[in-house]
Image (tube, rainbow, N blue to C red):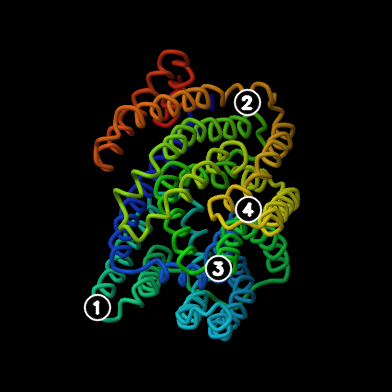
Amino acid sequence: MPDSSIASALRNAFVWNTINAIFSQAAGFIIFLILAHMLNPAIFGAVALSAVVADFVAIDGRYAGMDAVLQRGSFDRKSLNAAFLALSVIAAPIAAILFVAGPLLANWQNVPLVGYYMPIFGVLLLATPWLSVMDALIMRDLGFKTFAKRNMLSTVIGGIGGIAVAFSPLAIWALPVQRVTSTLFVLVFEFLHTRWIPGVRTDREARQDLFRRLIPLWLIAAINLSMQRATVLVFGIRFDSATVGLFRAADRISESVQNPIISPLFALWFPLMSKVRGNDRAEADVFTAIIRTSAFVAFPTFAGLIVVADDMTSALLPQSYAGVAPILRAVAITSLMIPIAWFNPIAMNALGMNKRSLHYSAIVAVTCIGALVAIPTRSPQLAVLIMAAPTLFFGFYGNFVLLRRLRISPLAHYLGLLPAALAAAAMAAMTGYVHVAFLGHFIPIERLGMTIALGVAIYFGLLATFSRRWMAERIHLLVGRSA
């Protein structure tokens, strides 16, 4: 187990990240359901296609910039200005490209809305460099509480703006308005907390060092998200915008389940590893704590989602979204690999293995996207599984690289994941049987609730019976005590 200071930091970070994720995802999901009843899947598909390139800067670039500043550890004005300028040099040309390319892509894909949405998303990129630096200033002092407030408020305020437009004659603008409103709120919120205004005074050393750190971190983030974006693009080419919308709806449901339990763990790596850097034992403790906790929550969640995918879709979405269920089940299957594969790149980055992480991420992305493109299928759910299949092999390879770096026994590592894996498998088998054999006459929302309650009881009952100490360690860690 980690020592008390590490456990306390884990607890504080995890608690606020979890509050943030649960509230933001719950509010975001409610907003999504309202908008889904007002807008057809093609509009969601048009927004997904329009945002593919923009998110390369708005999400990947923003957080890579924050991580680069945190990794460098210098917060003087010249260093912060260097980070701002480094991001601006990339963000401004991409914004201009999106502004011009929107109408061209709209004609190519025969999706007119893309021609309107993409330029808007391009303009929003101009705020990204400022946001990235302010993110780093907040997170310098482990400002998870401030981040939680920011995300929760921006979700609600952006959602209110989008819903208001959805109920008006301008309903096709609801999703862009939601994004614009949210971004502007975050910009004002972070400025009020940091009072930081960008400038042009930098020094050569700071610029070079920030670029050296920023580019690999940015590429790694972009590559790791490229598989989802590649799926959107391939779906847009191979299927139609309605199918893209169904995929995004399935992904949105999965994210609403995944983010409250997994995103808090992703957000721990850089801040916590920066606090224990150079202490081999502490680094190994942080790694083990995060990975085992991810198994504790991810295995039962996504095993259960496979069982209830049909009921969840029927209970939450209108009939026009009936095709979401099989795609959701495929996405849930790929999410079972979270403890094995998903943390490898960010763990390597947090340990200062940027170049190794970049090579690893690039190979995974090329292989998975290559499989998706090379193996044609008319089934969107099969396309999701084909793309994710190589990830498991590379996941184990990445594990061994990290375990060797941290001097952790592979056998001990995987035995530490086994209690959650076995309990989740047994839970899925039992609930699946009961779901089919005894609950068929209930309506979907009733069947969904009963299956979830049964699954929770079985999972925790099995752990309490056969792996009580292991479960206690996970729970005690999250409340900051030693088992």
Residue 236 disc label: 3
Q: Position of residue 217 (x, y in %)?
A: 65, 57
Q: How busy is the neighbourhood of tag 2: few (under 14 within 10 Å), some, or many (20 plus)?
A: few
Q: Nearer the viewer, mark 3 or mark 2?
A: 3
Q: Look at the picture and state if 93 lies above or below 278.
A: below
Instruction: Kindly identify the amino acid type of the residue bearing the numbered disc 2.
Output: Tyr
Residue positioned 47% across, 43% down in the render: 262
Name the element at disc 2. helix
Q: What percent of the width, then of the height, locates residue 444?
A: 28, 42
Between disc 1 and disc 2, the foreground one is 1
Instruction: Compare residues 112 and 280 and report the one nearer the observer.
Output: 112
Secondary structure state at the residue bearing disc 1: loop
Q: Dot 4 corresponds to which residue?
A: 71
Q: Mark 1 points at which residue?
A: 168
Disc 4 and disc 1: Cα gap in Å?
Answer: 46 Å
What's the amino acid at mark 3? Answer: Gly
Please state, as top left, top right, bottom left or bottom right, where the C terminus lies in the image.
top left
